[in-house]
Image: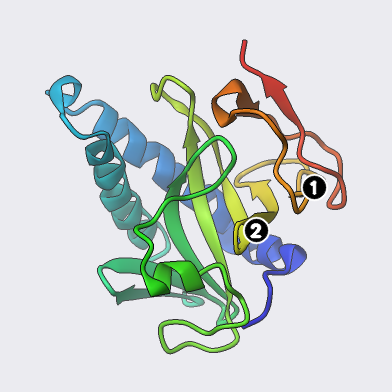
Amino acid sequence: MPTPHQPTVRQLMKEHGRDVIIRQAVEDAWATVKAMPGRAWWRRKTTTAELVWEHMIENVIAGLADDKDVRVVAHHDTVSFIISDTVLMRMKKADLQLRTKNYPTAQSTLFHAHESDLFGYSGLQRVEATYVLNRFATDIDWIGIVAQEQSNILWQFELGADAEGDIVAFPATPPAGPAADRVLKIKDTGAGDEAAQKKDE
């Protein structure tokens, strides 16, 4: 399984407007769940994320239905998307440091171990299409593609961004300080620069 190659992944996202379709799917899913009556008394914080995920998947399937180079794969109580027989993408909610959370099963751990193949597919680059909520969980701050190796973020870019230089390579060691003190802010710094972040206002 190859390590995700950001120029390749970005190009595939740009083709046929997939980046815009996926971004819109996430935004629409959030708007649908946010407008649900009774949301204020939901007892589990994960309820919102689970419902957003269901609507995201449904929206992406519908939005990419005419894209012959995208395959929808249901497996192990989840859904992934194989793009041009090159990239395997899954949809997730991420924290302010762009890390997703999973129950630590063997398969969830291996998703970010790129020396291993998963789900019976070989040679696919595995990435996540993620969304990040603001610190109050009242709105979406960022939607993009994230590549991770074990616990390290390799790189990320925002979906639907106009600039060509918004791909950011992350350092191997995450910056110090609590995640809640930072809000992701993408700058046009090029692929080799470190991620730019700014303090919450």
Residue 150's x, y, as percent?
Answer: 60, 64
Q: Which residue is mark 1?
A: 164
**Residue at image coords 70%, 64%:** 11
**Secondary structure at numbered mark 1:** loop
**Residue at image coords 42%, 44%:** 26
Residue 197's x, y, as percent?
Answer: 72, 29
Task: Name above or below for residue 195 compared with residue 92.
Answer: above
Q: Which residue is mark 2?
A: 14
Which disc number belongs to residue 183? none
- Badges 2 and 1: C-beta atoms under 8 Å apart? no
- Quadrant of the frame with the N terminus: bottom right
Query: What residue type is disc 2 on?
Result: Lys
Task: Name above or below for residue 81 compared with residue 148.
Answer: below
Residue 169's x, y, as percent?
Answer: 78, 51
Disc on the earlier residue, 2 or 1: 2
| Residue 62 sits in quarter | bottom left
**Quick one: 146 or 70, which is closer to the camera?**
146
| Residue 198 sits in quarter | top right
- Quadrant of the frame with the C terminus: top right
